[in-house]
Image (cartoon, grey):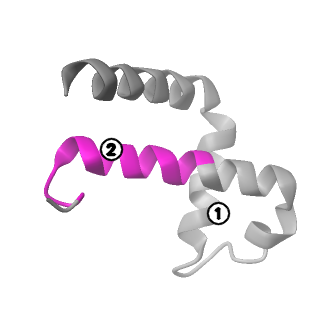
């Protein structure tokens, strides 16, 4: 089943996107900072969410990990 139709998979993909963008921005900020608008601006926005809301993103990642490990 596609991640679009499965809500748990969609949340997992979004969390992974946020974490990946924040990690890439920590290593090479110029890669994401030059594309703040447009379609590629989504990655910059995900990086900002990952940086500013990192305790909440981390908690969501832990909850998602337990959910995947123990409920499936």
> From which residue to which does the magenta span run?
3-19
- Residue 16 lies in the magenta stretch: yes
- Looking at the image, residue 43 sits to the left or right of residue 16; the answer is right
Q: Nearer the viewer, residue 12 or 31?
A: 12
Q: Report the label total.
A: 2
* Distance between the alpha carbons at the discs numbered 2 and 1: 18 Å
Q: Is residue 40 above or below residue 22?
A: below
Q: Outermost residue, bottom direction?
A: 38
Residue displayed at 13% across by 57% down: 5
- Residue 55 lies in the magenta stretch: no
The quarter of the image holding the C terminus is top left
Q: Residues within 10 Å of mark 1 (few under 14, many from 20)?
A: many
Q: Secondary structure at mark 1?
A: helix
Badge 2 or badge 1: first in the primary sequence: 2
Residue 4 bears which disc, if any? none
Quarter of the rendering containing residue 4: bottom left
Q: Main secondary structure of the magenta part?
A: helix
Q: Residues within 10 Å of mark 2 (few under 14, many from 20)?
A: some
Percent position of residue 69, x then y: 32, 24
Residue at which label 2 appears: 11
The quarter of the image holding the N terminus is bottom left
- Looking at the image, residue 72 sits to the left or right of residue 47; the answer is left
Q: Nearer the viewer, residue 39 or 64?
A: 64
Percent position of residue 65, x then y: 40, 26
Residue displayed at 86% across by 69% down: 30
Residue at which label 1 appears: 44
Percent position of residue 48, x then y: 65, 50
Label 2 with label 1: CB-CB less than 8 Å: no
Q: Is residue 59 above or below residue 57?
A: above
Which tag is nearer the camera, tag 2 or tag 1?
Answer: 2
Residue displayed at 33% across by 44% down: 11
């Amino acid at each position: 089943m596609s991640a679009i139709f499965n809500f748990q998979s969609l949340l997992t993909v979004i969390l992974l996107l946020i974490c990946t963008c924040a990690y890439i921005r920590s290593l090479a900020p110029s890669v994401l900072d030059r594309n703040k608008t447009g379609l590629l601006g989504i990655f910059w926005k995900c990086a900002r969410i990952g940086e500013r809301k990192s305790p909440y993103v981390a908690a969501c990642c832990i909850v998602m990990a337990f959910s995947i490990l123990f409920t499936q």
